[in-house]
Image (cartoon, rainbow, N blue to C red):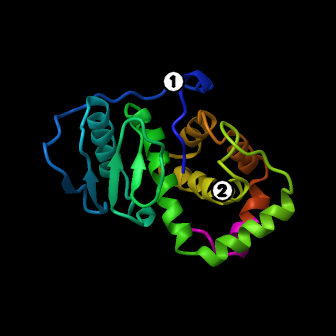
Amino acid sequence: MVPFVQTSVLRPLTAMLVVWAAVSSAAGQDASIALGSNSPRIVFLMTRRPPREQLAKQTLEQVLASHSLSKYTFTRKVVIEQGASNHAFPILTLNPYFASSPDELLSSYIHEQLHWHLRSRAAQQQAAIAELRRLYPRVPVGLPASAENEYSTYGHLVDCYLEILADRELLGAERTAVVIHGKPWYTWIYTTVLTDEKQIAGVVDRHQLRVP
């Protein structure tokens, strides 16, 4: 889960974000949309539909149409809700904070999808967390550095590592670096993953947590 953080705590982005304008008005009812031959069918569940939510939906549709995301799709229902925190369960929910930033929105979407991947490997994930506790016996808790508790912080070391791998595959190394260094939350987690990437990769591999 990636909480929504107020503007007052955001760090400056390391590069200018790409801005996309909305290209069309959205339909008035929830829709199941197949976006390209290699894209999964995603069901958007939206109720209030303020302009920012509509823009986020349109941007995500464009992202889905531009990338083959079948490998990273573990749930097909998506809620876009202004004022909500990003979270994976029970329904993948995204705040429209990155509505105008396709790379950042893609990364957030993949982050939450990967929680579903890890939940299906609960035993391996728990074993990986136990190993990470030994490697990092003291971790920060709370925003903007880390997750809401120690267990979630250790779990996010795995999720964020897998997110970075996926971003590199889909966006390339340079765009991924801009996205990750511009994250306003989980700053300790992402920094640790990048600094100790080889070590965390070993934990992920030993517990077979990579996306096949």
Q: Is residue 65 magenta?
A: no
Q: Secondary structure at mark 2?
A: helix
Read off the residue under disc 1. Answer: 16
Q: Secondary structure at mark 1?
A: loop
Left or right position of 183 against 58: right
Which residue is found at the position 44% from the left and 66% from the top?
A: 71
Which residue is found at the position 39% from the left and 58% from the top?
A: 91
Q: Residues within 10 Å of mark 2 (few under 14, many from 20)?
A: some
Q: Quadrant of residue 55?
A: top left
Question: Which stretch appears magenta?
Answer: 202-212
Residues at discs 1 and 2 in contact (Cβ within 8 Å)? no
Q: Quadrant of residue 82?
A: top left
Q: Is residue 206 magenta?
A: yes
The answer to which of 120 and 178 lies nearer the viewer is 120
Which label's residue is closer to the chain start, 1 or 2? 1
Read off the residue under disc 2. Answer: 152
Which residue is found at the position 43% from the left and 34% from the top?
A: 98
Q: Amino acid at mark 1?
A: Met
Q: Residues within 10 Å of mark 1 (few under 14, many from 20)?
A: few
